[in-house]
Image (cartoon, rainbow, N blue to C red):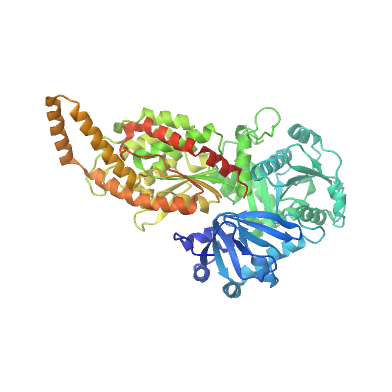
């Protein structure tokens, strides 16, 4: 292990480690002082099976293979990735490591030495309690049946009486999505009698089943009742019987046994189980509550949870995910609710919305056709921690290249789960995430590529805070984004701006899109700072020109970045090309035109660089260095379209810039596809 070749912001590490996320400032400082950042080279062993524990580890970037050493060779148990911590069980038990850990590729790890970690647990007892509970749960799952899976998750799905079938359908689709997107073992457990719905969705009717009488049963009794679905995941039907006081313990025992052999166990809990639903949900790792987009239905679901007693449990609230059924799928007839109102009624943020399935039965296909399955894919990727994030960087007119990249991503059906944009990246990202296709965004830009649509003589202002008010570009944004908020878009989107008073990064993910974009594109000295409430904001590129960090903090595990800022080499080549072109054109003209050209060039030389060139070029030279650091340290794949012979204000070259983005994406297409295929 050695120090990484570039600096890491230790404070960012806390976003990688959920265990430390809710700590107080003084507690964070204690950990901050003990944290060491090291780089482990590809194939280098972090620790070996049988060695005494020496540290707590968390992956900052890269991947680690967990394996055991057997007489006949090595057996891989799991690949773990960014944000996962390991090595702590041996620290707690004091026993030697039961597995070995090795870097799959060059990996950066946050490390806390054993002595420091022990001191931290003594100073922050609740950390010790949380880790002990995690250890207890893992040991409990090994009791009856040898564990072949290193890490597993139980997901409980509940929808209430009116939408039991909708919740069942969601659980089946989620099982399909998890297996398809993670390539891991998944089992769907259902207690429903909806044979027709299951048959229509899977193409096979459920056969047989296991009767859960009590918590004492042999694993073989269960496994012989498990059936395949033909969709990549397995299924187990469970009969519950009537008036069974041992039902909840029996189901919990069943689930904890299944996750020894499955990475994900998805159980649909029908409303007919009564209070046992909530006893089982309380023991799940995640609780997905499916709710209609209807005010009364949301209130009723919230009240049921309160009356059950689980809603007063802080830990239960943390693992609860609210899934909203959109209009046609929902049974309510009330007006459409805003997401803010839905969240306030349920006292919980919305995790995802499910669009209508459409006519006919749901078809589970690998292309994830239709809005419903695309939502399922995004949810599955979030749970499976394989979210693909796209960072669209700043760059003024050069940011139009983002459109070309988006076109290729769409053409090749490369999923993007979350987007973060800075400055021009925020503008292009807002249009795309609001529902326009990449081709439609291209049409919008080409129809408005003349500078008069973005800047006008009436837009100049007395230079108290900036030279341009920004009214023209604000009208442009309102024309296409209207009054949409972040809640109205289908793809999670983050916009980066800089707070003028504190000069700190601000990430917008709520409120009006137009306001957030205007804040992010307000180049200091050129545009007036944009005011939202009592705060003023300037260009996000000043502080974070390529917001890969925002994606990582939002859960992205595979990060694609697009840096459109010109490098110093490209700037140098640009001057050489333009000078050569001007000389050649001048030499081919008659003497009188050469005289005019000479006079014109002298006039231009006198006027250039103008104040806009000075401000923007100075800002972009600094931004490029910051963007390169982000690309190198936090991006799995960085795209950099060629910006030779392009100026920051070349909006009239929109088509050429879009084409350059396409060329760069095409050039790295195999790498893009390999990144998606990679199973961490």
Question: Closer to the camera, 446 or 163?
Answer: 446
In this rendering, position of residue 236 left or right of residue 45: right
**Which quadrant holds residue 40?**
bottom right
Relative placement, left or right, of 668 versus 501 is right
Q: Residue furthest front?
A: 72
Q: Is residue 657 visible?
A: yes
Q: Is residue 532 visible?
A: no
Residue 289: x and y, percent?
67, 47
Rendering coords of residue 472 (x, y %): 32, 36
- Residue 246 or 108: which is nearer the viewer? 108
Q: Is residue 223 above or below residue 120?
A: above
> In the rendered view, would you say 3 is above or below 395?
below
User: Position of 510 compared to 54: left or right?
Assistant: left
Q: How many marks?
A: 0
Residue furthest out toward the top: 590
Quadrant where the image shows the N terminus:
bottom right
Coordinates of residue 8 in the picture (x, y in percent):
46, 60
Give percent across and percent down for residue 240: 84, 48
Residue nearest the observer in this picture, 623 or 340: 623
């Amino acid at each position: 292990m050695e120090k990484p070749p570039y600096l890491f912001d230790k404070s960012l590490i806390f976003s990688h480690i959920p265990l430390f996320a809710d700590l107080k400032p003084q507690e964070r400082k204690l950990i901050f002082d003990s944290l060491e950042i090291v780089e482990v080279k590809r194939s280098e062993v972090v620790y070996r099976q049988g060695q005494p524990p020496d540290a707590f580890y968390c992956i900052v970037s890269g991947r680690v293979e967990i394996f055991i050493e057997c007489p006949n060779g090595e057996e891989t148990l799991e690949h773990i990735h960014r944000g996962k911590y390991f090595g702590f069980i041996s620290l707690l038990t004091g026993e030697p490591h039961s597995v070995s850990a090795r870097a799959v590729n060059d990996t950066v790890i946050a490390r806390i030495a054993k002595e420091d970690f022990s001191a931290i647990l003594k100073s922050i007892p609740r950390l010790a309690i949380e880790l002990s509970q995690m250890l207890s749960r893992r040991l409990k799952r090994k009791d009856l049946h040898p564990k072949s899976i290193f890490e597993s998750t139980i997901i409980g799905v509940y929808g209430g009486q009116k939408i039991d079938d909708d919740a069942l359908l969601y659980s089946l689709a989620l099982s399909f999505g998890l297996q398809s997107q993670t390539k891991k073992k998944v089992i769907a457990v259902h207690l429903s009698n909806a044979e027709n719905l299951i048959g229509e969705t899977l193409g096979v009717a459920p056969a047989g089943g296991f009767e859960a009488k009590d918590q004492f049963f042999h694993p073989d009794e269960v496994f012989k009742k498990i059936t395949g679905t033909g969709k990549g995941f397995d299924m187990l039907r469970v009969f519950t019987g009537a008036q069974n006081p041992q039902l909840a313990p029996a189901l919990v025992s069943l689930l904890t046994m299944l996750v020894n052999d499955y990475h994900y166990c998805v159980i649909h809990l029908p409303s007919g189980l009564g209070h046992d639903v909530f006893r089982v949900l309380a023991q799940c790792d995640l609780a997905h509550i499916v709710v209609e987009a209807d005010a009364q239905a949301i209130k009723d679901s919230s009240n049921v949870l309160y009356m059950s007693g689980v809603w007063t449990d802080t830990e239960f609230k943390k693992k609860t995910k609210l899934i909203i059924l959109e209009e046609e799928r929902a049974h309510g007839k009330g007006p459409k609710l805003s997401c803010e109102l839905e969240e306030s009624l349920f006292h919980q943020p919305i995790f995802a919305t499910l669009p209508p399935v459409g006519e006919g039965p749901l078809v589970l296909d690998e292309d994830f056709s239709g809005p419903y399955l695309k939502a399922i894919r995004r949810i599955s990727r979030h749970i499976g921690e394989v979210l693909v994030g796209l960072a669209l960087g700043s760059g003024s007119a050069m940011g139009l290249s983002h459109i070309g990249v988006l076109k290729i991503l769409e053409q090749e059906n490369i999923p993007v789960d979350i987007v973060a944009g800075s400055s021009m990246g925020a503008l292009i990202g807002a249009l795309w995430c609001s529902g326009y296709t990449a081709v439609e965004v291209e049409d919008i830009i080409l129809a408005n590529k003349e500078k008069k649509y973005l800047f006008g003589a009436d837009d100049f202002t007395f230079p108290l805070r900036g030279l341009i008010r920004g009214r023209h570009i604000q009208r442009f944004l309102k024309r296409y984004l209207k009054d949409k908020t972040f809640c109205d878009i289908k793809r999670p989107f983050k916009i980066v701006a800089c707070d003028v008073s504190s000069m700190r990064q601000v990430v917008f993910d709520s409120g009006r899109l137009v306001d957030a974009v205007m804040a992010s594109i307000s180049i200091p000295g050129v545009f007036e700072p944009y005011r939202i409430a009592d705060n003023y904001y300037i260009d996000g590129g000043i502080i974070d020109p390529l917001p890969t960090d925002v994606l990582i903090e939002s859960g992205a595990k595979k990060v694609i970045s697009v840096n459109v800022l010109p490098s110093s080499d490209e700037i140098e080549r640009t001057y050489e090309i333009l000078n050569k072109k001007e000389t050649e054109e001048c030499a081919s003209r008659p003497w009188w035109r050469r005289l005019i050209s000479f006079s014109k060039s002298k006039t231009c030389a006198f006027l250039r660089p103008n104040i806009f060139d000075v401000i923007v070029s100075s800002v972009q030279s600094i931004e490029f260095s910051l963007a390169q650091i982000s690309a190198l340290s936090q991006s799995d794949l960085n795209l950099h379209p060629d910006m030779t012979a392009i100026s920051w204000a070349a909006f009239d070259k929109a088509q050429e810039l879009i084409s350059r983005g396409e060329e760069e994406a095409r050039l790295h297409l195999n790498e893009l596809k390999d990144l998606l295929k990679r199973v961490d």
